[in-house]
Structures are given as C-alpha cells and as structure tokens.
Image (tube, rainbow, N blue to C red):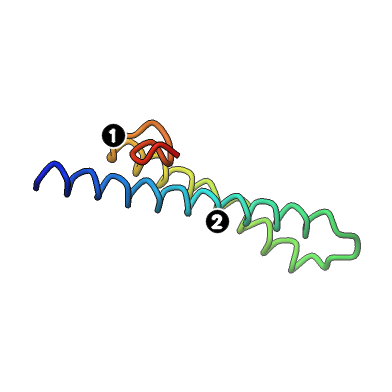
Amino acid sequence: MTESESFKLKIAVSRLNKLAILQSSALMKLSAAILGMDGIDSKARNEVLEVFHGLQEHIDVLSELNDLSGLNGPGDADGQ
C-alpha cells in the first residue's frame, strides 16, 4: 500500500468513526428523551433501556477502531 493510499484509508476510517460517534450520541439523546417522558409503558421503557445500555458495545467497538487506526480521535487524519 502506498503512502497516499494509507493516508486515504486513515481519512476514511476517521470519518466513519466520527459518523458512528454521532449516531451513538443521537441514540443516547433519543433514549434519554424517551425515558424522561411521562406515561411511557413499561414494555417500551424496557426496550429503550436495552438500547441505551447496548450503546456500551458501540463505544467499545469505536474504541477498538480508534486504536487500530492509530489516530487519537475522529478527524485526526484530515485535521478536523
């Protein structure tokens, strides 16, 4: 792999990592908003809690991806 190809790959990984972080953040906010609603039935509350708690797996995968990419955070390869 050439240096240019390697750089492009790092940029792609970085942007995908950033996208996944944004998606996880949106899921957290949505879950928290739903859980804060009055009158939500217990089945729906349990399902939302499952999603909320399942976000830890997303965070773990993102951390692994970040470690594999050799970057310190999303956007490092492209200066964002």
On residue 35, the disc is: none
Compared with 42, 3 (above or below) is above
Q: CA distance from mark 2 to mark 1?
A: 22 Å
Q: Nearer the viewer, residue 51 or 42?
A: 51
Measured as percent of width and height from the top left, residue 58 is found at: 48, 50
Measured as percent of width and height from the top left, residue 34 is found at: 77, 60
Q: Is residue 63 left or right of residue 47?
A: left
Residue 77, quarter of the rendered image: top left
Q: Are marks 2 and 1 in contact (CB under 8 Å)?
A: no
Label 2 sits on a secondary structure element that is helix
The three-letter amino acid code for the residue at tag 1 is: Gly
Q: Is residue 5 left or right of residue 79?
A: left
Label 1 sits on a secondary structure element that is loop
Q: Residue furthest right?
A: 38
Measured as percent of width and height from the top left, residue 45 is found at: 75, 62
Q: What's the residue at 40%, 47% (across, down)?
A: 61
Q: What's the residue at 62%, 56% (across, down)?
A: 27
Report which residue position mark 1 lands on: 70
Measured as percent of width and height from the top left, residue 15 is found at: 40, 50
Q: Residue furthest left?
A: 1
Chain-order first, disc 2 or disc 1? 2
Q: Give the position of the C terminus as an image quadrant.
A: top left
Q: What's the residue at 42%, 45% (across, down)?
A: 62
Q: Residues within 10 Å of mark 2 (few under 14, many from 20)?
A: few
Q: Is residue 6 left or right of residue 11?
A: left
Report which residue position mark 2 lands on: 23
The three-letter amino acid code for the residue at tag 2 is: Gln
